Amino acid sequence: MPLETMFLFLITDLMFCLTPGPATMVAVSHALPLGPRGGMRGALGPIVGVNIGNFIWYGLTAFGLIALIATVPTAYSVLRWLGVAYLAWMGLQMFRGGTSALNRQPARSASFGKGFLNGLAVHMSNPKALLFYTVFIPPFIDPDGNVLLQFAILAGLTVLTETTGLTFYAAIASKARNLGDADKAQPKFQKVAAVILIGAALILVWWNLTDGAMESAFNLSKGKTG
């Protein structure tokens, strides 16, 4: 996998992970309590649970995408374009605003095991996760390369980005016990994230138009039907 692809994925995925969502909420709620079951120690369980959830989603997506490339390569090419459209749409949504109320999260004192299960359950039950993995990953995958290896690389990068995002907000919660400032900063950060996501979408448009893998996928499809 080219370094520029990994870098673009890293930056783009980091923008998603630094934008509060259900996974952030559960990590924050476990970091808020005082005592040994709160703070960063309390957030550790949810953070590990969310990352295990990411690996499960990656595994499901990888094998589904491999089957799609083998059976309907043209559909995979369409999926790559849908991924580009998804990034652009998410960027526009961030420009329009809409933030998560971190400051209203209740404190949840729990053991590592319970926190782990909460993080895993929240991440696996999020209906947006299926859409995210289905359309966000394909633009970064070269069907002519080792697909499983590419998925392993992206999964490793996601551990880095997800852990960074969750740790960032959990650290704020454990230190300040008040996330009002983080709530106020969200609109400004979202504008920056929106620019990066739209920029990433434009880069992927260029890559899709010049990528030989796209052409080979269409040629393979024609060969099967012609």
Image (tube, rainbow, N blue to C red):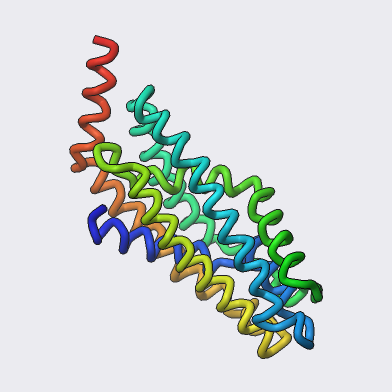
Q: Residue at x 65, y 81 (%)?
A: 40
Tally of numbered tags: 0
- The picture places residue 201, in percent across and down from the top left corner, at 36, 52
Instruction: Say left or right for 11 vs 129.
Output: left
Q: Does residue 123 sit above or below 170 in this rendering?
A: above
- The picture places residue 175, in percent across and down from the top left corner, at 66, 89
Residue lying farthest front?
113
Residue lying farthest top?
226
Instruction: Say left or right for 160 vs 120.
Output: left
20 or 194: nearer the viewer: 20
* Quadrant holding the C terminus: top left
Q: Residue at x 55, y 43 (%)?
A: 131
Q: Residue at x 45, y 36 (%)?
A: 63
Displayed quadrant of residue 145: top left
Q: Does residue 98 sit above or below 42 in this rendering?
A: above
Q: Residue at x 68, y 89 (%)?
A: 176
Displayed quadrant of residue 143: top left
- The picture places residue 18, in percent across and down from the top left corner, at 53, 69
Instruction: Say left or right for 33 vs 216.
Output: right
- The picture places residue 180, in percent across and down from the top left corner, at 69, 82
39 or 197: nearer the viewer: 39
Instruction: Say left or right for 104 vs 65.
Output: right
